[in-house]
Image (tube, rainbow, N blue to C red):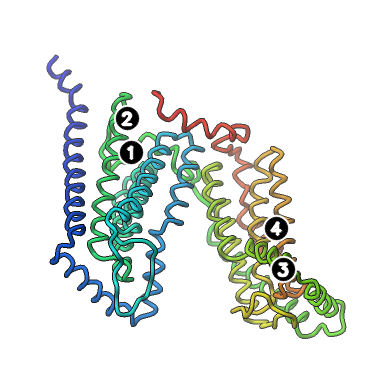
Amino acid sequence: MTAVKEVARRPIGHFAERSIAGLVAVTGAGVAFGLLLLLVRVQWSPLQDVDHGLAEWFNGLVAPHHALVTVLQAVTDLGGRPILIWLVTIAVVGLLIRRQPRLAVYLIITGVGGLILDPSLKTLVGRLRPVVDVPIASAPGNSFPSGHALGSFVAYGALLLVFLPAMAPRWRKPAIVGVGVLVALVGLTRIALGVHFVSDVLAAWLLGAAWLGVTAYAFRLWRRERGRPVPPLTEGLEPEAGHDIAPAPAEEHVLAHPRSAVAELLVGWVIVFGALYGFGTYVSYHAKGTFFDTLDTKVPQWFAERHTEVLTDVSWWWSKFGDTHAILLISLVFCPLVLAVWRRWRPVLFVALAMVGELTLFLASARAIDRPRPPVENLDGQMPTSSFPSGHIAATICVWLAITLIVFPRTDRWWRWIFVALAVLMPVGVATSRMYRGMHHPTDFMGAILLSALWIGLLYLVIRPNEDLKEGNQPAIESEDVDTLDDELARAGRAD
């Protein structure tokens, strides 16, 4: 009987031991942050001397090297709000699709808390940013604590705790180390770029550790109150959810024959480039007196004669729908969602290769053909690439055509026709705006169509993005259940 009682007490004992250790660590981080906050607030001279001395040393080390500055700015962007908000938002939507509302609530609360702590403490302390001899970066607002360092610690830490169970055990320690290195690098870039003192970053890390510890402890108490076992944090917040939140648990191989697929794509890329080069060279330099020449002469002039202030503004905005940032944003939203819904990497690979292939084909063709812009006013000014083919139009066609080819056969709901409409209207709108702005000839538009049709057709034959449908793959959430996603958050606080 004593042995039975001892076994029954063991989980409670383990939970108590881990909870006490965790609370000590969280309390220690909070006390250390409070002490650092006090020293900064009273402007303690030794700390100020260290902060200013290191700021000047880093500035002298980094400022002369422009390539290093570029790398540091790329790394620091990984801790910026746009990327962190995108990561957490996509993760929350994916968790709701996978029927994991408790984890979604945890991410929302933890992320929102981090967003509230940063500006409120900056206002409270009111510390100015470093002043260095050679400014190489700038940032709005006050300095203490570092928002990038705090946000990256909280967001990446929370995502790690949520998705650790989806990883194989052998990858969990490397993932923890990787996240730790990433958070450390983001913090160091803020110091090296001269926008934060060392104490700003240290305070952000301490505050991030305290807040992440508090929310993780609250989640563990939540589980305990519902009679669930509370595992070590090295196993994640909900180990039993590992299979459900794994990206593609039932997909053994993305491609059955990856080597032959790579060879086919490389050969196909060369053939597509050859077709583009042939057509582009002809319409650019050998089509005098033909229909193509008349079209390329008359259409830009027709648009140039009809410029108005309103149409120019509209064309600028519509043109933005086809630029690199917009296309990248669409891809970064669509790919995680399709992975969450259909649990297959192959459609994601299809979209990713569509974008990579389009970009490389566009750059190679533009460089090889080197076609001048139309001889009218170029409203966007001097561009780094030549006129043929249109990168804006080709990217727009590729991304919306790829999305439509994936979505349309996967649902029988009426809204799939919206994607068909977008695959037509978006390229036409972007093409019209680019020609209106005097940036492309009509045959540049034709070149974009040729590039997109050949490359997407090749990818569809090689990658076969909808192959899982033949295997009977069903979405993680049925189309008729989409309207019920909002209810998942409401149920999250209820007992199981």
- Contact? badges 1 and 2 (CB < 8 Å): yes
Q: Secondary structure beneath disc 4?
A: helix
Pick whichever of labels 3 and 2 is earlier in the sequence: 2
**10 or 223: nearer the eye?**
223
Eye-nearest disc, 1 or 4: 4
On screen, 350 above or below 139?
A: above
The percent coordinates of residue 257 (x first, y second) are 55, 56
Gap in angstroms between the C-alphas marked 3 and 2: 60 Å
Q: Secondary structure beneath disc 1?
A: loop
Query: Extreme top residue here?
Result: 1
Residue type at mark 1 is Leu
The percent coordinates of residue 331 (x first, y second) are 56, 56
Q: Secondary structure beneath disc 3?
A: helix
**422 or 192: nearer the eye?**
192
Eye-nearest disc, 3 or 1: 3
Q: Quadrant of the rendered structure where residue 426 is?
A: bottom right
Gap in angstroms between the C-alphas marked 1 and 4: 42 Å
Eye-nearest disc, 3 or 2: 3
The residue drawn where x is 28% and y is 45% is: 211
Pick whichever of labels 4 and 2 is earlier in the sequence: 2
Q: Which mark is residue 309?
A: 3
- Contact? badges 3 and 1 (CB < 8 Å): no
Q: Which mark is residue 426?
A: 4
Residue matched to label 2 = 223
Left or right, residue 452 beside residue 70: right
Residue matched to label 1 = 237
Pick whichever of labels 1 and 4 is earlier in the sequence: 1
The residue drawn where x is 29% and y is 69% is: 130
- Contact? badges 4 and 2 (CB < 8 Å): no
Pick whichever of labels 3 and 4 is earlier in the sequence: 3
**284 or 57: nearer the eye?**
57
Residue type at mark 4 is Met
